[in-house]
Image: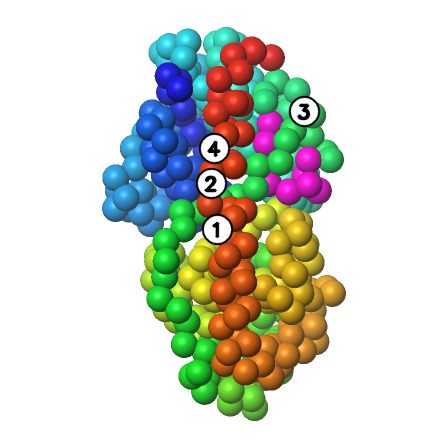
Amino acid sequence: MNNQIILFVDSSMIGGIETHIIELYKLLHKNQVSCSILFYKNHGNNEFYELLDKQSIQYNFLQGTLISLIKRFHSYDRNTVIHTHGYKAGILGRLVCKITNKHCVSTYHAGETGKGKMWLYNRLDLWLSRLSTNFAVSEKIIKTITNAQLLENFIAITEPPSTDFAQPLLRIGFVGRLSYEKGPDIFYELAESMQTNKQVQFHLFGDGPMRDRIPQLNNLNYHGLTPRDDIWQHLDALLICSREEGLPMTLLESMAHYKIVISSPVGAIPSIINNGVNGFLMKSANTLECQQSIEALLALSTTQKSEMAHSAYTMLEERFSGRKQFNLLQNAYTAKTIL
């Protein structure tokens, strides 16, 4: 493939989109595809930039203006493909690709509709989907988008050391943005309700608007924003108590590190977790369901826990290693129809 791929994003934090972009860059680079990341503006997201530097990932900044975007897209040759991520990059990227006659591919990551101004941006993003070749990370999102196909998230798979489930203390983690749709308040309530259970310890990784509501509890440890590779050594299991999701990268990362996942049934997650086989799938996102799932996990033997983690890892290798995803991407990038 002779195309140059520009991964276009407007990023101000480290979240699922940012993690996906890193994995996408690595997948393209592994397959000898020229690519780089283009930020609409430098938002001072220094932890993310440092992470890119650490992995020798190429990136550039625009000035956060429409004119700088038009000039940059005009400078690219005809073999350049713009691949947008997130609603703002999607809206601007598609419109400017139309003006500059560039091929545009967009990935839709978010399952939530938002409120107020966010709702308007999301509606505009969906309406403009007719100007691009589209991917979505879950079947639910696909239903709202023009000419979209499923592109499940993926992750580079390496053989990690097995988690020692024989330890007497089970370490449960929340990894993500501390905002309402991710359900950190459920995690807080859960830790508070299980303070007397000495078999469980809770670990919280991330930042966001609900950080100031973190309770001071002996069984709850707040780590803040933490490099992804440094998270998993602190955990035995990941709890996803989201109210809305697409296909969370943290789920795949957790399984890749032999951690057991307990999750609410949102987005694409029910198509991944076979309850009781490769993880625990709750009926809904609430404190009681979380506690019951943790107690069910505690009741398993060390061997049963290891078998569950291994089952998840095997599924991950077969479905989310990137082989299938690269074929889909290659077809989209080389389809030179300008919509």
- What residue is pinned by disc 4? 326
Q: CA distance from mark 3 to mark 4?
A: 19 Å
Instruction: Give the side of residue 238 with respect to residue 47, left or right.
Output: right
Q: Which residue is mark 2?
A: 322
Work out which quarter of the rendered image holds the C terminus and state it: top right
Q: Earlier in the sequence, mark 3 or mark 4?
A: 3
Residue 245 spot, x, y in % from top left: 63, 50
Q: Which residue lies under the disc numbered 1?
A: 317
- Residue picked out by circle 3: 147
Range shown magenta: 134-142
Q: Amino acid at mark 1?
A: Glu
Label whose residue precedes the other's in the sequence (4 or 1): 1
| Residue drawn at (28%, 44%) of the image | 55
Please say if 212 is above or below 91. Answer: below
The answer to whether the residues at label 3 and label 4 have Cβ atoms under 8 Å apart is: no
x then y, percent, for residue 168: 45, 87
Q: Is residue 189 magenta?
A: no
The amino acid at mark 4 is Phe
Q: For mark 4, give the secondary structure.
A: helix
SS at badge 3: loop
Q: CA distance from mark 2 to mark 3?
A: 22 Å
> Does 69 sit left or right of 123 as displayed?
left
